[in-house]
Image (cartoon, rainbow, N blue to C red):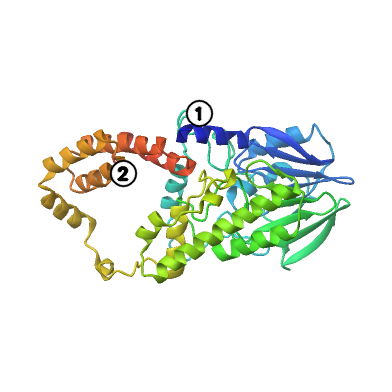
Amino acid sequence: MQPIEQLREHSEEFRKEIIALAPNVFGAVGYAASNVYMLVGQGGVIIIDTTESTTAAQNILTEFRLRTELPVRAIIYTHSHRDHICGARIFADNDAVQIIASHRFKSDLIAPDNTRPAPGKALMQRTARQFGMGLDFPDERINLGCGPGDRPMEGLGAGFVPPDHLVEDESIRLQICGIDLELTHAPGETDDHLVVWYQEKGILFCGDNFYRSFPNLYAIRGTAYRDFEAWAASLDLLIAYQANILAPGHSRPVVGSDNVMQVLSDYRDAIRHVIEATVAGMNAGEGPDKLAHSVTLPECLAKKPHLKEFYGKVSWAVRAYFSGTLGWFDGNPTSLERLAPYEEAQRFIQIAGGTVRLMEEVHTAIARGDFQWSCELLDRLLLVEYNTHTCRRLKAQCLRALADAQINATARNYYLVCARQLMNDPGS
């Protein structure tokens, strides 16, 4: 199956549906980038996560209201990523709504640190590229890897309500609307992750500690180091619940205790394999470039549908682990003071026989389908501002070809948005 067909097939994970997980427990899948869950209790309901926009939240609430008219009494944020917290105002439609989160809850929506410079513009630009903002659905942006490619964007980021109850203990038990829940810290994609255990129903709401893709151990939009070891340990914790149903923040619920055990064990084992293989290479003196190409999952894990690289990617994880544990330096003394990119490009072009000769090699590489090499050559020509319009057009062509070879939705989206920018925005 071609990569683009695999990615289209993966979109089935995000088909729009209100799923009854158990009597009085419902999940909204496919309405937004992330899922929303509703637990119906005595005299009220509990909402777990709230999506990224007020429009998506309203669409979900309208569907939930077909199941019950009981008021919302509590909202639980599993973590602080924007796609889980920005529809809360729609669900918190009365002053009595309690909003619960980890005491480690940290979002750039609240109390941003203005005391030091932050790469906000770069982060926003890269986020737009990762999620394919501006791409046409369904031909270009197929899905997000973690959610549907087509979702409402009105009110994006507009509905956040700060938590008013912070969970400080590692694990607490609460009773809300007659429903007994256990909330436990389980760091993964973020340090502030809470998982919610509904023991009576055997349902574990795991936030982003699991979704049906290789985990996004590094996000190409740019992110601080995600603690691989902590994420793997959290999966051990999740396994210990022996849940009958796993309700993730993205993708469809996993049903059946054996299935839950399998996907969580595979997820944990994949992360630990990346750690162990990367550490072995690091200790052998290998740098991140070599390791990113040599570390792969064993076949027994790589063939699992829930570990396909639709969202996270093994090579990116390897680079992130290397940088997060040893820093940027690859250990090669040559790397301590590399030539400036412009100077390296000039020397490279001279050795290659000049700009015309290098452009001939670009066309040869494109003709044989070697699009990565073509991009690397074109980058050098663009640095020296040689025939810029043609080089930008050719690089855009190569990026579109690289996109079509990807099952990873974020890589595909990033390639395609950059291709558009090369053709439309001279300053990109």
Above or below — where is 77 with respect to 151? below
In this view of the protein, which residue sits in the foreground, 301 or 405? Answer: 301
**Quarter-of-image position of residue 80:** bottom right
- Asked whether residue 213 appears in the rendered view, the answer is yes
Q: Residue at x 45, y 63 (%)?
A: 278
Is 285 positioned to the left or the right of 167 in the image?
Answer: left
Q: What is the tally of numbered marks visible in this picture? A: 2
Q: Position of residue 377 (x, y in %)?
A: 23, 45
The mark lying in front, picked from 2 and 1, is: 2
Task: Give the SS element for disc 1.
Answer: loop
Left or right for 417, reference 38: left
The location of residue 275, given as percent across then percent down, is 51, 63
In primary-sequence order, the first of circles 2 and 1 is: 1
Q: Amino acid at mark 2?
A: Gln
Residue, disc 1: 138
Q: Amino acid at mark 1?
A: Pro
Report crowding for label 2: few under 14, some 14 to 19, many 20 or more residues within 10 A (C-alpha): some
| Residue 372 numbered mark, or none | 2
